[in-house]
Image (spheres, rainbow, N blue to C red):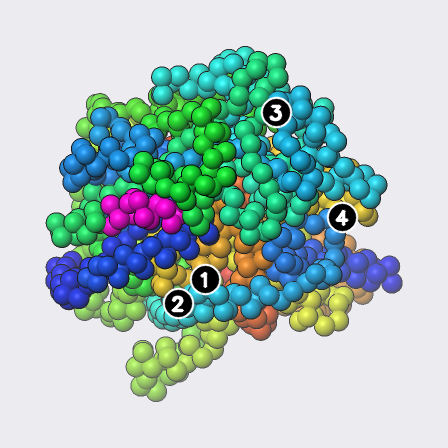
Amino acid sequence: MRYYLFLLITFCSMAAQAEKMRIHVWHQMIYGHRQVLAEVLREFEKQNPDIIVQATYRETEELRSGYQSAAMGGSGPELVYGPSDQIGPFATMGIIRPLDEVLGAEYFKQFDPLAAPTYNGKHFAIGDGVGNHLMLIYNKKLLQSPPKNTDELIEFGKRLTVDKNGDGRVDQWGLVFNYTEPFFFAPFIPAFGDDFIKDEIKPNLNTPALANTFQFILDMRDKYKIIPKECDYETANALFKDGKSAMLINGDWSWGDYKEAKIDFGIARIPMVSGTGKWPASLVGTKAYSLNVNMKSPKHLEAAVKLLTYLTSTPVQLQFAEKVGTLPSNLDARESDIVKNNPLLKISADIMEVGHPLPIVPEVRAIWDSLRIQYQKVLAGSLPPQVAAEGAQNLAEKQIAEMNEVLQPDVGAYIVKAIFALVILGGLWMSRGSLMGFIKGFQGPNRFAYYMMLPAFIGIFAVIVYPFFYNIAISFSNFSLRTFQDWSIVGFTHYINALMDPKFYSLLLKTVIWTVVNVFFHVTLGVFLAVVINQVMPFKGFWRALLIIPWAVPQYITALTWRAMFNQEYGPINIMLQKFLHMSPIQWLSQPTTAFAACIITNVWLGFPFMMIVALGGLQSISNSLYEAARLDGANAWERFRHITWPLLLPVMAPAALLGSIWTFNNLNVIWLVSNSGEPGDQTHILVSYVYKAAFNLYRYGYAAAVSVIIFLILVIWGLGMLKSQYKKETQ
Amino acid sequence: MIKRILAWVAILLFAAFSLYPIIYVISVSLRGDNAFQTQSLEIIGPNSTYRNFVDLFTKTDFLVWLKNSLIISSVTTFAGVALASCSAYALSRYRFRGRNSMLFALLTTQMFPATMLMLPFFIILSQLHLIDSFWGLFIIYSSTALPFCIWQMKAYYDTIPRELEEAALLDGCSRWMIFTKIILPVSSPALVITALFSFMSSWSEYVIAAVVLQDPQLYTLPLGLRSFQASLATQWGLYAAGALIVSVPVLVLFISISRYLVSGLTMGSVKG
């Protein structure tokens, strides 16, 4: 099979080569940039008629994980373009190629050193622009000149935060920004006295500077009330574009958006911290192109390099500079009038002067993650700033150690391999009877059954069983960031670590609560609505159809919709609570308990229709005569439900509830999308979402695989128990 | 009387609960691009516009994605129904060695956290060069929905009396004819549900499609919708409009077959 497939593929690729070479580029350029890219690529194709370039947009995180998986499997795009902090991890994994192999040393000299970063002494990427830095953007209609220090910032902010119509809600904010995300508040840390990364690699988080920065943001929110209580990127962006905010902290990438929205804006440095006299240091980096290590032929590589040099060349960079205002990385291009006469770029360069380069080592990811977790706890009021700063340092050190750990095979490895071999041999030996029977079965009286089942089981084997065993193998291995290309079986370490970790048990408890609460509401609501529809309501079909809606809408759409509905300021849920119940707004998504509650509400909404339909089916089968007899005996509605409906419904509901709880236990989508991957501070995770994060965000594939095997075992044991007790009840 | 009023109140409340998010999406889709943040509860505000819907069809590749999704979903549905109905029939009517463990194994596949099948999936798919082809998706989608569908079909077949078949067998019908001419026609509620599940699993799946399909011309609807969410600036209006249109076919499907759902989805414990 593989062989024919291979032949087919060689044939196809030969046919394709005879025509044109295809080069794929994955990028994460936002809308305006994408249009310029499309233009310059059209031009490239005109110059090189034998090459077709296919550019694909991916959201940053997806670009990262998608590229990792594709490159690991030996494929992926020839060129990958993204923020410089992905260079370190990719290079460590060995999935991007050192550019020094294909481009001479002279080549790199044309660029701003920031755009040609080295990692372990080699160039792995080349940037087409420099910047990506944060600044203060202000709406000139509301504010003539920007604040110079934080005292002014607060003073201006207070003046510009106004409730115009006197309904107790702010209609115009002094300042908005995505302050729950560490990247957006990081510039303040050095301004308060100390940088948060030492020697480009070590976390430096347990400092008064970090604690003071935490406090500063808290004060802006709670004491001076110049920023909204809840504000993600979308909210900040939309408020500024609507003219509902005087100031905004955002990066150079956003200018195009505001120009298009016809906002007359100015840019400036983020105001100096009055207490220390230091300027906030934006992180300055580049977005850069890298070459995939998997390239089918030298010709392919040649074409990819040609494209890479084209995309970083002066004329292309100038087009980007002109149309979307990026600062070229090419030193020649910097001298052009287009750049020199652009007032925005001039101020932007001035802002960059106080910036710090964004480190590209993989460790940065763990630092961001720990910072985010602790910071969000501070914002939610569950940790005081100083304690959070200390916690962030410890967490970062732990995560870096875990991420960089390369496990060596121990005795466990031999045991695992021996067990694997024993299981396979033993399995074959034990099932030799069934196996022979199975093969004989193809001639026997049951052969019809075999032929009927065969196609489905081949499919299930290929798609579920084989990957399942693959995953078990990974769970015993040291598959992680540093062993991406060659992992090996090392033993039981991941299982021991997982089971020794108190966090595992608290997550398990939370998962159980999540499952029980959800399934309880699914079943009770489902049965209740089914009974009501079935017994009382006219137009049964109409109500049934109406209540089925939550089930029919694709999950990812509903989850994102509910997230928007829970927004503190602009979500209809809070607006309704205030308008109709006169409650004060609830901080749904920024407090761990309410965020978890929000996930549960969403999931209850998603799940009750399924149970309702099952219950309706069960109710249909209950004969009316039973109820009539009960009525004659004088049973009231509750007694009739208790003694007729419920016992007869139970055998229908029990398997549905069993299946429902398995699905709920493993439901990743809702938690991930509603709480924005575990926010605030990683406190809304259930086991599966935690596993997902461990695998795809912190590269701990082996550990994640082990935890997922444990999850599976828990469910199997529990499910078996349920089935058995069910079976007993039925036979009694 | 009070009971009736309470019932009406409860039903209306829940109808509102289940409808509201959809209404909210409609209202976002009708707003201009910049009016995402609003504190008004109006569904159709003063500046409403259907521009997002026009843009969706004229300025984006929405129709291409729609076509791709339709192709993938219909193939998946067809394959899913064919595979599930055949194998479930064997599991329902025949007794052979390993039958019980097969049934149990099918159930346990539901217990594995799907997130961890992903990594092996990706490795295998790229090794087989099934990236950027619909084939990879056909195989994955039609097989992942199978365990549930087989259980579902088997439970339904179990409720069909065997006498029906025995009579036909005496008349000299082949087993295949019995299956196609007698069993399948009376199993329509279960078939409809199997079709629905297979269809849904492919119509709204995102994570696997995102890795398998890399060429924008091959995108399915969820992938296309997602591309409106540029890293840092979502085109909310377009997204909402697209989300509505993606949901409509499934909604229509669900509502039109909700009658079958009721009789087909009782886990076999009740005679259909």
* CB under 8 Å between discs 1 and 2: yes
Task: Name the image quarter holding residue A439.
Answer: bottom left
Identify residue type, mark 4.
Answer: Met
Residue segment shown in magenta = A307-321
Q: Nearer the viewer, mark 3 or mark 4?
A: 3
Identify residue type, mark 3.
Answer: Lys
* CB under 8 Å between discs 2 and 3: no
Q: CA distance from mark 3 to mark 4?
A: 40 Å
For this rendering, which residue is in front, A219 or A511?
A: A219
Instruction: Identify the subunit bearing mark 1.
Output: B
Is residue B76 visible in the rendered image? The answer is yes
Q: Residues within 10 Å of mark 1 (few under 14, many from 20)?
A: many
Would you place residue B32 above or below residue A30 in this image? Answer: below
For this rendering, which residue is in front, B93 or A540?
A: A540
Q: Answer with mark 1 or mark 2, whichever residue precedes in sequence.
A: 2
User: Residue at horizontal 53%, vertical 21%?
Assistant: A279
Q: Which residue is mark 4?
A: A576
Task: Name the image quarter holding residue B98.
Answer: bottom left
Q: Which residue is mark 1?
A: B221
Give x and y (percent) for residue B116.
Answer: 37, 43
* Callout 2: SS: helix
